[in-house]
Image (cartoon, rainbow, N blue to C red):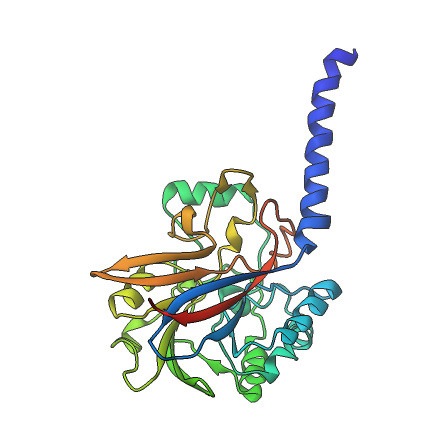
Amino acid sequence: MRARYGVPLAITAVGAAGIAYAAAFEARSFRLRRLTVPVLPQGMRPLRVLQVSDIHMVSGQRKKRAWLQSLAGLRPDFVINTGDNLSDPEGVPEVLDALGPLMELPGVYVFGSNDYYGPTLRNPARYLLEKAQGRHGLNGNAPAVGVVHNPWEELRDAFDTAGWVGLGNTRGKLKLDAGEIAFTGLDDPHIKRDRYESVAGGPDPAADLSLAVVHAPYLRALDAFTADGYPMIFAGHTHGGQLCIPFYGALVTNCDLDTDRVKGLSTHTAADHTSCLHVSAGCGTSRYTPVRFACPPEATLLTLVERP
């Protein structure tokens, strides 16, 4: 009897322990990554950029709020928020409380699909199936009946009032002591709100530096930014794969980006141009899959320095 049931029970116990670790520990094991990126023109002093992404705030996440508030102590030159702040339509006040100290600093932002629409309960295995079939996200379709529309306008108004620059299919600038930084942004390609034709034309020649920002790193967006000559692109959305296999990596990216570039710093090449690409693994999860494995939640402090 012990031999018959011992192995299945052991497998079940290991699986339960893994889920408990992924939900109770790793999903709350917030950390800061630090990177140095040689992307500035000669003669420009280094810039410290804090990227936050995929917060997916749910009411009651006190540890996440406190950690985000603490990031203001890094005193970056500016903040880039690459979207998906919400995972709960009641979460706006807590997002604003978490980001309040950072909103006292210069910043820019784009929104992701979860800022606009509440998450829906889905079988996680569907992500693997959709990858195999070449499908991703909503594919531009209208959300299903019953999907909650999140109060993204409240987020937008608060960010704008704080002086953060919205980059949904538009351009913007930050004037810093180090110089004038121009930004070009897209609304979320995951739900086909991106309209590159409205911002095409390449970097601002009058600015000291031009950067590109988008929530979901779909290839069409990366190709367009890179072909236009932007030296660096910032994105989020992928959660770093969220559930990864140790020593192997991510299984999916939830977009058409390859898994080798699911998080961190890489490059992208299009039309004989190459851009630096940074994809944040983000610091949250969907409220319906509140687990991470071999992919802890993060924010990133990037120090931009002169190109060789």
Q: In which quarter of the view is residue 67 placed?
A: bottom right
Is residue 81 among the parts visible in the rendering?
A: yes
Q: Quadrant of the N terminus?
A: top right
Q: In which quarter of the view is residue 103 placed?
A: bottom right
Residue 25: image x %, image y %? 71, 49
Looking at this view, name the residue that lies furthest to the right: 1
**Closer to the camera in the image, 74 or 25:** 74
Count the marks.
Answer: 0
**Closer to the camera in the image, 229 or 110:** 229
Q: Residue at x 33, y 64 (%)?
A: 221
**Closer to the camera in the image, 43 or 25:** 43
Q: Residue at x 53, y 87 (%)?
A: 163
**Closer to the camera in the image, 185 or 113:** 185
Q: Is residue 42 left or right of residue 6?
A: left
Is residue 60 among the parts visible in the rendering?
A: no
Q: Residue at x 25, y 70 (%)?
A: 228
Q: Is residue 90 left or right of residue 241?
A: right
Residue 14: image x %, image y %? 70, 31
Residue 177: image x %, image y %? 47, 88
Q: Is residue 79 left or right of residue 73?
A: left
Position of residue 210 relative to residue 8, above or below, is below
Position of residue 61 relative to residue 156, above or below, is above
